[in-house]
Amino acid sequence: MSEFPPLTFNVPAPELRPGDTPDFSGVEIPRAGSARRPPVDVDPKEIRDLAFTIIRVLSRDGEATGEWAVDLPDDELIEGLRHMMRLRAFDARMLMAQRQGKTSFYMQHLGEEAIACAFQKALNKGDMNFPTYRQAGLLIAQDYPMKLMMCQIYSNAEDPNHGRQLPIMYSSKEYGFFSISGNLSTQYPQAVGWAMASAISNDTRIAAGWVGDGSTAESDYHAAMVFASTYKPPVILNVVNNQWAISTFQGIAKGESGTFAARGHGFGIPSLRVDGNDYLAVLAVGCWAAERARRNLGPTLVEYVTYRAGGHSTSDDPSAYRPKEEGDAWPLGDPILRMKGYLIRKGIWSEDRHTQAEAEIADEVLSAQKEAEAIGTLSSGSAPSARDMFEDVFKEMPPHLIKQRQEAGF
């Protein structure tokens, strides 16, 4: 007889299930402005605390406060708000288009608009993002044509990817937006390798990798962290913690680690945790990490604390695994409403201007949609040529593909 009891293992479970009352009382939200801003060349060991707090700039009263508060011109602040509004309006139209059968699939950014829209402002032209499917704000913040984004979603004849990617998996070298991979965490080793190549080439461009909280459980994530720690390339490693992977809560991926940012400590990488619903905080931390990279001070890990207010995708029903009202109870609020409140308090915005901007942006998105749909959608109009399947595979097309193309009549 064994002196030990039968073996067991732990299966983490969320505290709340559908039908329960949302409760975020266990989420510690520090006062806005309370987190210190260290010098860019700080030793990672001296900022371990910043992986456990949340860097916040915008207070509940709509005031920008603390050492991380950035002094931006009024026009740039308004532009930032409008970018987030544009992304939300774009989401609403494309979600409706999917429900109408005009595309097969769509993924919203609802509640996460500040992260990509603000971060992009910390980068320079030529820098490269390795995004997941919820960073379309990186394109929106650069005024990438919405019509082209919609053509990609509809897989029509003017789809820049020629129908060879799932909807919403954009790609643009010119805009520093690497082709999206649906198998997440591949973005990390790609970003680290690209940053190393930039350094080897004596270039000045930096890279940014993106994953969600669930993807940190993948082996690619940890392999990239080892390379980043060892070779110290000019890269920013972003973790968007929106509390939920496809249908599993963050505890499955996080395990017993206090925060996702804290995982960087084991690799000696400076790690910060920021309010992902605070446009100014995201921008400030992005600029801090980008300066570190440009000054050859190595990688930075950033965790954005946010909440996925919508479903994981149009194939998902979040009410099956979390309380229906949980998004409304999220204590960090709505990024657009928070930025709007700040601009009104600052005296450069108003309720009337906001209403007018909403109408203007809605018209702008609808106009782009009409142009894209005039070319084609999933169910009608012109589609990419079958010839495209043979192109852009090899630098020089090998004989067997030339033969296959000819046999197909192209």
Image: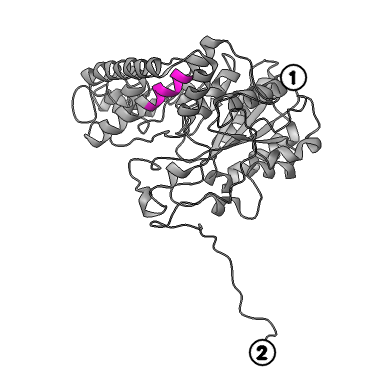
Categorize mark 2 by other alpha carbons within 10 Å: few (<14), some (14-19), many (20+): few
Q: Secondary structure at mark 2?
A: loop
Image position of 78 with respect to 3: above or below: above
Across and down, in percent, residue 357 comes to 37, 16
Asked if the magenta segment contains residue 199, the reply would be no
Of 279 and 184, which appears nearest the observer? Answer: 279
Of 208 and 396, which appears nearest the observer? Answer: 208
Q: Label 2 near label 1: C-beta < 8 Å?
A: no
Asked if the magenta segment contains residue 82, the reply would be yes
- The residue indicated by pointer 1 is 295
Location of residue 403 (image quadrant): top left
Across and down, in percent, residue 25 comes to 56, 50
Image position of 382 with respect to 223: above or below: above
Is 189 left or right of 49, judged from the image as shown? left
Indicate which label's residue lies in the foreground, 1 or 2.
1
Residue 55 in sight: yes
- The residue indicated by pointer 2 is 1
Q: Residue at x 40, y 42 (%)?
A: 312
Q: Kindly report the distance in space between the C-alpha atoms of the residues bearing marks 1 and 2.
A: 63 Å
Amino acid type, callout 1: Arg
The boundaries of the magenta stretch are 81-88
Q: Secondary structure at mark 1?
A: loop
Name the magenta segment's main secondary structure.
Answer: helix
Across and down, in percent, residue 193 comes to 63, 30
Is 336 left or right of 187, judged from the image as shown? left
Amino acid type, callout 2: Met
- Quarter in which the C terminus is drawn: top left
Categorize mark 1 by other alpha carbons within 10 Å: few (<14), some (14-19), many (20+): few
